[in-house]
Image (cartoon, rainbow, N blue to C red):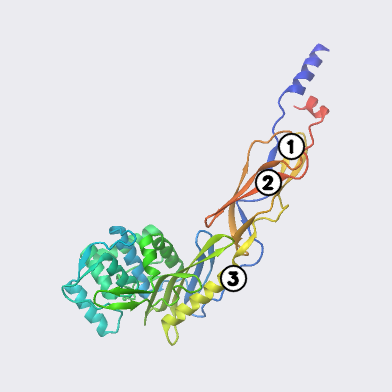
């Protein structure tokens, strides 16, 4: 009898194992509904992404095509990596070389985009970048190339190295201006380049300028007529016979208190005016995307996200509280569960953890609660457990 009493006391008072949480969710949540239909261009290729959240889709060929003046985005990126320039800083003076003069004359003769320059002139780094990104000067690409690397070959090598580092697997540069049709890419790569370049404050400030005033050229307007309209804040246009109309762009809009950033690319557009077609198509894409992006529940209130299971056979469902996220139908949101060690005594409504989502700068914690009390272990189970 004494042995039985000792054994019973040991069984009764030894620690009860903690219940275990079993999740019904994987590492992501897909927002309900079909992906929003976008107004894609009927020709060429295009893609659109929400920065930090994911792709909204793409159309057209996935094979690399000429990108014309979009190559200047990489040129500016390399220059700003080699010669960082603070906001509103002018930077060093760059002399206009005979090579720049020759390039300006040759390109003007073939009706290419040039910024007028004269022998003996100097431009600050800021002015040269304005001439490259806003005034679209192919000759300014030559000026910056010679200043940075002494030769086009050496500079183009830097451009291609930067492309590899960024993971632009379908992009190749053969010149700094994009005039050479050998400079090719795809929309997805251009979007990635745009995201990286726009992270540089000076670059971001430059491509948002509607106009600039240069030493010889005077007042020059940005060909990107979409800047300042429908949330578009840049980035770069490009057009020639081989590439058609091209536009790499970023647009922003505040939705539900969060800033949503779209980055897109349109390549190979045709029409009476190639560049006008590219700008028009991009604007339609942006409008349609922003119309579809809104605040939606990450998971519906009361949604069953898992079950707490105890060693003695009891179980209780775990549900999510109400929460909202800025997104669109069909978006896949990466999530992770945060559930600690559970007590054997869990009352109805107890908070047992959170469902965390981090996407596009949004940090959302959805509280997880049990919907009823977890039954306690029975005396028989406590005395007979192994």
Question: Residue tagged by mark 1?
Answer: 346
Q: Residues within 10 Å of mark 3 (few under 14, many from 20)?
A: few
The mark nearer the N terminus, 3 or 2, is: 3
Q: Is residue 32 left or right of residue 2?
A: left
- Residue 259 visible? The answer is yes
Q: Secondary structure at mark 1?
A: loop
User: Which residue sits furthest top?
Assistant: 2
Classify the position of the N terminus by image quarter. top right
Question: Residue tagged by mark 2?
Answer: 368
Q: Is residue 236 above or below residue 21?
A: below
* Measured Cα–Cα span from mark 1 to mark 2: 13 Å
Asked which quadrant contains residue 310, the reply is top right
- Residue 368: image location, x then y, percent: 68, 46
Q: Is residue 247 left or right of residue 365?
A: left
Q: Is residue 293 left or right of residue 45?
A: right
User: Which residue sits furthest bottom?
Assistant: 272
The mark nearer the N terminus, 1 or 2, is: 1
Q: Secondary structure at mark 2?
A: strand
Task: Point out which mark residue 291 bears.
Answer: 3
Toward the viewer: 99 or 385? 99
Asked which quadrant contains residue 39, the reply is bottom right
- Residue 141: image location, x then y, percent: 28, 71
Asked which quadrant contains residue 80, the reply is bottom left
The mark nearer the N terminus, 3 or 1, is: 3
Residue in view at x 57 percent, y 60 percent: 257
Classify the position of the C terminus by image quarter. top right
């Amino acid at each position: 009898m004494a042995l039985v009493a000792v054994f019973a006391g040991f069984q009764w008072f030894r620690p009860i194992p903690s219940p275990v949480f079993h999740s019904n969710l994987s590492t992501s949540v897909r927002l309900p509904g079909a992906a929003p239909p976008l107004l894609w261009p009927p020709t060429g290729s295009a893609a659109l992404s929400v920065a930090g959240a994911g792709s909204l889709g793409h159309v057209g060929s996935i094979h690399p095509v000429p990108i014309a003046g979009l190559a200047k985005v990489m040129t500016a990126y390399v220059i700003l990596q080699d010669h960082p320039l603070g906001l509103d800083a002018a930077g060093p003076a760059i002399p206009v070389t005979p090579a720049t003069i020759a390039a300006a004359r040759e390109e003007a003769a073939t009706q290419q985009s040039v910024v007028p320059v004269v022998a003996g002139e100097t431009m600050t780094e800021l002015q040269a970048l304005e001439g490259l990104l806003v005034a679209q000067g192919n000759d300014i690409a030559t000026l910056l190339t010679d200043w940075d690397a002494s030769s086009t070959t050496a500079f183009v090598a830097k451009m291609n190295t930067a492309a590899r580092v960024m993971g632009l697997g379908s992009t190749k540069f053969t010149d700094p201006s994009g005039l050479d049709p050998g400079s090719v890419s795809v929309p997805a790569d251009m979007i990635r380049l745009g995201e990286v370049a726009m992270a540089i404050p000076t670059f971001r400030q430059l491509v948002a300028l509607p106009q600039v005033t240069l030493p010889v050229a005077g007042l020059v307007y940005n060909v990107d007529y979409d800047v300042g309209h429908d949330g578009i804040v840049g980035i770069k246009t490009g057009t020639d016979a081989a590439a058609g109309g091209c536009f790499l762009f970023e647009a922003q809009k505040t939705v539900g208190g969060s800033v949503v950033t779209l980055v897109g690319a349109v390549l190979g557009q045709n029409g009476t005016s190639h560049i006008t077609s590219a700008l028009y198509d991009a604007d339609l894409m942006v409008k349609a995307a922003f119309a579809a992006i809104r605040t939606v529940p990450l998971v519906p209130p009361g949604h069953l996200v898992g079950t707490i299971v105890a060693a003695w056979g009891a179980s209780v469902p775990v549900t999510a509280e109400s929460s909202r996220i800025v997104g669109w139908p069909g978006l896949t949101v990466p999530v992770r569960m945060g559930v600690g060690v559970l007590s054997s005594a869990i009352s109805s409504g107890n908070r047992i953890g959170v469902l965390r989502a981090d996407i596009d700068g949004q940090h959302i914690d959805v509280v997880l609660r049990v919907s009823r009390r977890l039954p306690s272990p029975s005396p028989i189970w406590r005395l007979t457990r192994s």
